[in-house]
Image (cartoon, helix red, strand yellow):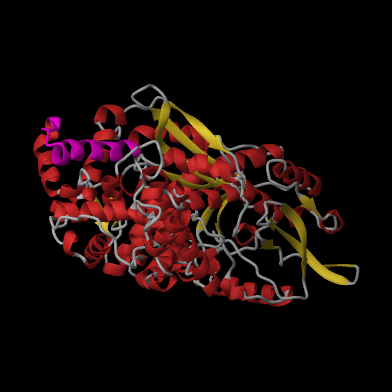
């Protein structure tokens, strides 16, 4: 008996009936006494019946036999030796663009990445088999065979081109997501048009549909169906009413299936639609999805995904091309991120990494490219530190600056007064807070602005700006405008301020009373300047290279030589009062004063003070904030080598 749809399969593949597989089945059945006409459709019908017979081939796609299904899925999952080297290089590039630096893909990592690819491909094909062979669809064998054979030959869906990519033996992408509604659409139009001979109306896209039906290409029909059945119209995409669902961190596979299942069939492009990936991600943290309303008013359409890892936001994805966030979802997503640990930090980091990637690409193409003022401010981190997703500083920052050489030097010299002037507000805020704590006169803002204007002109003329720019370009020391109250503050006052500062830090301030109480208020506050309520200086963000990592006595000798050689620079060792003012200045500029690089940025060795002996050791005060956020008024061994910095101005 001829199976409906066999003629369509012949039209779709005219060589199918004469293939060795179909011919051998026909000969086998004929030898058993069955009458198999030589017409192409009859032979194809006989072949399908043979595959669907549990006593013969018992093809699992048609019969549901699990052993057969497992064999067929395995045959279409990428082999480890076929994973292209380019895939691993891509993972390295992604890691680099997220600030992790140049990672090494170890054999274990290769194995894990390969297994993840294979697992997602197995899971993807499993969804198709489960649905095609189940009762929900109720599809005839010809359509099951047609769908399965076609799905194993196509790759991921390109939203911009509205088409599926072709699959090769080295394709690492998951198999197409199962969209039940889209598959039902394909069956309905094909069955009516090519099997039953009915006229199908494709509405506004009728001409395109008729062309697709004539060709019978599953991938193109399925891509067309996704657009037809997925809420992708401007009206529905502008729909923002919905709700957030949180899938809590767990190793329970039921939650993984619930998460991945809620994403499949919507063409999100999110890897979380793969069950194994969802399992892995839920193992690392919670997963938040924002669903908007479907045509029935239910919140089932995924629009935003926020993945957590180690208690912080690790990834944010939308459903636009390249998984970018839709503009209409920006506010909803931003509000959610504000309530999640690391949310605002993630937004800033993502913007930094995107911008740094663009600069890295530009420098690769043209190292001599002219950079805008905003690009220079960003690259050289004048206003704030570039933050990435890695544990260490993104190596591309220094690599790009190395490529630039001294190209940017003239523009940086020109920009420096402006950069320092831009720090006026935060410097004044910090100054006024410290001045109030030391019960000192507070200069008003207009007077402060006039003093700074005069000082900037002085620094421009006496070589201070040139020194600062050279230190910045050669050593990476960013200039920080420091406005220290021009007062003498005793130890108790400085101690109280430091302790109060620590109340807003991750850890309270550690204070070495036994050392600091041996120094006078004049020594801890620094030399007063004649006239005025404030002394202005420029504090470098890192150590002074000329001082090296030496004992205190050697650093002091080097420092005195520097003062003699460049008296106009007014070099000085920052005092403890300068130090706590510096902390407050960085906080006023939005610095959290915690995380990698904090200690390097804040540690000051007060090597100009007389070392004191305690417990057989000779030491001087050392102040700073550790990377974990703990402020310290501590001790620095005077006889051992250590880093130090000097301020200028």
Q: Residue 378 location in percent, x, y? A: 41, 55
Asked if residue 330 lies left or right of residue 446, the reply is left
Asked if residue 368 lies left or right of residue 480, the reply is left
> Residue lying farthest front?
33
Q: Is residue 244 above or below residue 392?
A: above
Q: Residue 283 location in percent, x, y? A: 59, 50
For residue 227, what is the image quadrant?
top left
Q: State which quarter of the image contains the C terminus.
A: bottom right
Closer to the camera in the image, 188 or 246: 188
Q: Residue 501 location in percent, x, y? A: 70, 43
Asked if residue 573 lies left or right of residue 377, the reply is right
Q: Is residue 572 visible?
A: yes
Is residue 186 shown in magenta? yes
For residue 96, what is the image quadrant?
bottom left
| Region in magenta | 180-203
Q: Is residue 73 above or below residue 158?
A: below
Instruction: Tell me which residue sits at (55%, 62%) in the image.
Output: 392
The mark tally for this picture is: 0
> Residue lying farthest top?
297
Is residue 143 shown in magenta? no
């Amino acid at each position: 008996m001829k199976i409906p749809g066999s003629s369509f399969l012949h039209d779709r593949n005219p060589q199918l009936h004469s293939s060795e597989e179909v011919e051998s089945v026909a000969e086998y059945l004929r030898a058993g006494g069955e009458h198999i006409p030589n017409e192409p459709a009859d032979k194809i019908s006989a072949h399908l019946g043979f595959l669907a017979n549990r006593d013969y081939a018992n093809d699992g796609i048609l019969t549901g036999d699990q052993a057969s299904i497992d064999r067929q899925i395995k045959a279409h999952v990428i082999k480890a030796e076929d994973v292209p080297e380019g895939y691993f290089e891509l993972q390295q590039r992604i890691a680099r663009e997220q600030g992790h630096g140049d990672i090494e893909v170890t054999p274990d990592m290769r194995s894990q990445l390969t297994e993840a690819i294979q697992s997602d491909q197995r899971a993807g094909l499993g969804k198709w088999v489960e649905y095609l062979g189940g009762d929900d669809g109720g599809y005839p064998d010809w359509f099951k065979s047609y769908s399965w054979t076609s799905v194993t030959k196509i790759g991921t869906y390109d939203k911009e081109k509205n088409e599926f990519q072709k699959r090769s033996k080295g394709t690492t992408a998951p198999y197409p997501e199962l969209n039940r509604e889209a598959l039902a659409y394909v069956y309905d139009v094909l069955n009516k048009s090519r099997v039953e001979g009915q006229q199908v109306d494709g509405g506004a896209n009728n001409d395109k549909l008729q062309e697709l039906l004539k060709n019978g290409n599953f991938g193109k029909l399925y891509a067309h169906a996704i657009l037809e059945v997925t809420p992708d119209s401007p009206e529905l995409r502008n729909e923002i009413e919905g709700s957030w669902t949180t899938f809590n961190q767990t190793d329970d596979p039921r939650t993984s299936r619930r998460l991945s299942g809620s994403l499949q069939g919507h063409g999100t492009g999110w890897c979380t639609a793969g069950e194994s990936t969802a399992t892995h991600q839920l193992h690392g943290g919670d997963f938040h999805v924002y669903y908007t309303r479907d045509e029935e008013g239910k919140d089932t359409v995924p629009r935003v995904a926020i993945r957590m890892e180690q208690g912080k936001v690790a990834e944010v994805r939308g459903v636009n091309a390249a998984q970018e966030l839709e503009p209409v979802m920006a506010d909803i997503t931003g509000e959610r991120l504000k309530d999640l640990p690391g949310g605002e930090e993630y937004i800033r980091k993502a913007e930094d990494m995107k911008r740094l990637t663009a600069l890295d690409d530009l420098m690769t193409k043209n190292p001599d490219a002219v950079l805008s003022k905003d690009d220079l401010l960003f690259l050289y981190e004048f206003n704030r530190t570039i933050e990435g997703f890695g544990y260490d500083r993104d190596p591309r920052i220094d690599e790009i600056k190395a490529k630039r050489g001294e190209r940017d030097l003239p523009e940086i010299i020109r920009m420096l007064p402006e950069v320092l002037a831009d720090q006026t507000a935060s410097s004044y805020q910090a100054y006024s807070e410290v001045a109030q704590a030391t019960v000192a006169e507070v200069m008003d803002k207009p007077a402060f602005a006039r003093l700074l204007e005069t000082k900037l002109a002085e620094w421009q003329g006496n070589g201070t700006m040139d020194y600062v720019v050279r230190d910045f370009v050669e050593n990476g020391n960013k200039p920080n405008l420091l406005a220290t109250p021009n007062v003498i503050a005793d130890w108790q006052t400085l101690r109280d301020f430091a302790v109060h500062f620590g109340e807003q830090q991750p850890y309270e301030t550690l204070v070495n009373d036994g050392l600091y109480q041996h120094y006078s208020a004049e020594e801890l506050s620094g030399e007063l300047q004649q006239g005025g309520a404030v002394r202005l200086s420029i504090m470098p963000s890192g150590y002074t290279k000329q001082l090296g990592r030496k004992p205190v006595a050697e650093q002091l000798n080097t420092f005195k030589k520097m003062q003699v050689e460049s008296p106009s620079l007014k070099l000085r060792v920052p005092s403890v009062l300068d130090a706590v003012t510096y902390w407050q200045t960085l906080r006023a500029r939005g610095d959290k004063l915690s995380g990698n690089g904090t200690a390097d940025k804040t540690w000051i060795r007060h090597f100009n003070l007389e070392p004191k002996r305690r417990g057989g050791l000779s030491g001087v005060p050392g102040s700073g904030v550790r990377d974990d956020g703990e402020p310290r008024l501590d001790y620095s061994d005077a006889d051992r080598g250590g880093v130090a910095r000097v301020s200028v101005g």
